[in-house]
Image (cartoon, rainbow, N blue to C red):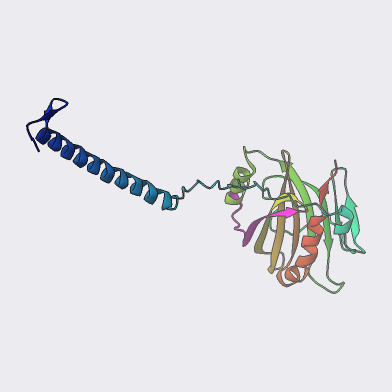
Amino acid sequence: MNLNKKYFGMTVTQIGILAGLAGTAFLLFCILGISVIRRAAGSALQPPTATLQPTVTMVLTPTQTTTPAPTPLPYESLIPSGWVQYRTALFEIWMPAGYKTAQTTDVLVTGLGGNPIVDLSLSGSTSSKSPNKIYMMVSYEPMTADTFEAFFTARLRGLGLSPSERSKVTLNTVPAVRLIFSGRKGNNTDINELTYAILDGTTIWYVQYTAEITEFYNLLGNFEASAKTFRVVK
């Protein structure tokens, strides 16, 4: 074979080299193509990655609640059977039968000192043979301080008596202060005095019960039941 003979302007040797380069290029192209196809096929076989979606959480706003005010009991339900009504132009109150209007009283303190106006004064006893008297008194006066607490504190300071008990209470939903005083009066008898101080607008009412100390505790339930029947006449 004449290797120097030219075809298309190239010798046989040159054509052989060109053919070898073309074959090598074709082989590389095939390898690259196969690699790309395998990668694509591998990606298609992989399971899709799950994308977590944000969860919406419902937040409940706490409901505001209010404490309901105590419901007043019907006034008639506060009156024990057989009790007697005492009524003036300003108020009414009920007591067990047997109490009479008293012209004089032997108590520890009228109101919380000062000069309250006595609107009702009663006396009674546990029996006709008892040497001890039981007193019940209702009085009132204008409040002469900016607040009930200031008035109350000043009066207690000036009394010279310290209450053995003091608490805030309600008399059938009406706010009041309950006090118990202890002392000795009359024929050197130890006595206790239950006092309710009630603020009605700019007027302070005092409802008080006084008895010999043993009788006092025996009758304390009656005294408290009586105080609940006190109401200002509107």
User: Residue shown at 42%/52% (left/top)?
Assistant: 45
Residue 86 location (% of width, % of height) = 88, 53
On whether residue 161 falls in the magenta region, the answer is: yes
Residue 47 location (% of width, % of height) = 44, 53
Residue 109 location (% of width, % of height) = 69, 55
Is residue 134 shown to the viewer in this render?
Answer: no
Residue 61 location (% of width, % of height) = 60, 45
Magenta residues span 158-171
User: Residue shown at 47%/48% (left/top)?
Assistant: 52
Nearer to me, 111 or 68: 68
Is residue 230 shown to the viewer in this render?
Answer: yes
On whether residue 136 falls in the magenta region, the answer is: no
Nearer to me, 231 or 208: 231
User: Residue shown at 65%/47% (left/top)?
Assistant: 63
32 sits to left or right of 97: left
User: Residue shown at 24%/40% (left/top)?
Assistant: 26
- The residue furthest front is 1
152 sits to left or right of 196: left
